[in-house]
Amino acid sequence: LAKTTQPISMDSYEGQEVNITCSHNNIATNDYITWYQQFPSQGPRFIIQGYKTKVTNEVASLFIPADRKSSTLSLPRVSLSDTAVYYCLVGDGNNDMRFGAGTRLTVKP
Amino acid sequence: DAGVIQSPRHEVTEMGQEVTLRCKPISGHNSLFWYRQTMMRGLELLIYFNNNVPIDDSGMPEDRFSAKMPNASFSTLKIQPSEPRDSAVYFCASTLGQRGNTIYFGEGSWLTVV
């Protein structure tokens, strides 16, 4: 079972790029890396997922080095509405999916 | 498509009462997860099912907690008797249970035990 480590909190300003790195040294061959976003009073929701190299969608990019022991979520030009908790999760979707503490991102005007 | 549906959304109950939380996973999903979230402990995995079978309930806090999944479209999490420290948001989530599949969460059941 891969364990993840993320910074507890980060601050940013509107319009900046934010990079959140997650460490997962014990990631297994079958594990994917998935990032979730959680707003207050809501359940976590999917942002992006990858297995290796780089993945980009309309809201974020995910960078995964060759050894896959870490990953970096990149949020371009954040706005106030991006203030949330971001979780990195590793797993194969078919076993226990345990979340870490997450990173609380605060975007300031 | 309907997402994961949980009920009740909010419940306030007195200590000692039985609480039953309900979940309807997304149709076709074969893995279901129950999580509990508090400020102090974050998002904890309580139990998960694959194809209606409980696989790992090591996260269930104690014998007062029980979960069932009688069929592919319904699951319950029961607390009996409830205690104030059980106050939390309980999330149900489901996934296809295949490599790389995303977990989809319900909106949560907000439980307050007084």
Image (spheres, coloured by chain):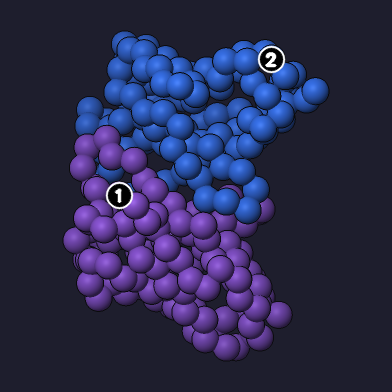
Q: Quadrant of the C terminus of chain B?
A: bottom right
Q: Is residue A105 left or right of residue B98?
A: right
Whether residue A68 is visible? yes
Name the element at disc 2.
Answer: loop
Q: Secondary structure at mark 1?
A: strand
Residue, disc 2: A15
Question: Which chain letter goes with mark 1?
Answer: B
Residue that extends furthest to the right in the rendered view of this protein: A109
Give the CA distance from mark 1 to mark 2: 34 Å
The count of marks equals 2
Q: Residue at x 61, y 76 (%)?
A: B11
Q: Colour of chain A?
A: blue
Q: Nearer the viewer, mark 1 or mark 2?
A: 2
For disc 1, the neighbor class at 10 Å (few under 14, some 14 to 19, many from 20) is many
Query: How far across and how far down the image is residue B88, in percent?
Result: 61, 64
What type is the residue that disc 1 sits on?
Thr
Residue pointed to by mark 1: B95
Tint applied to chain B in the drawing: purple
On screen, residue A98 versus residue B32, left or right, reads: right
As displayed, is residue B28 above or below residue B64? Answer: above
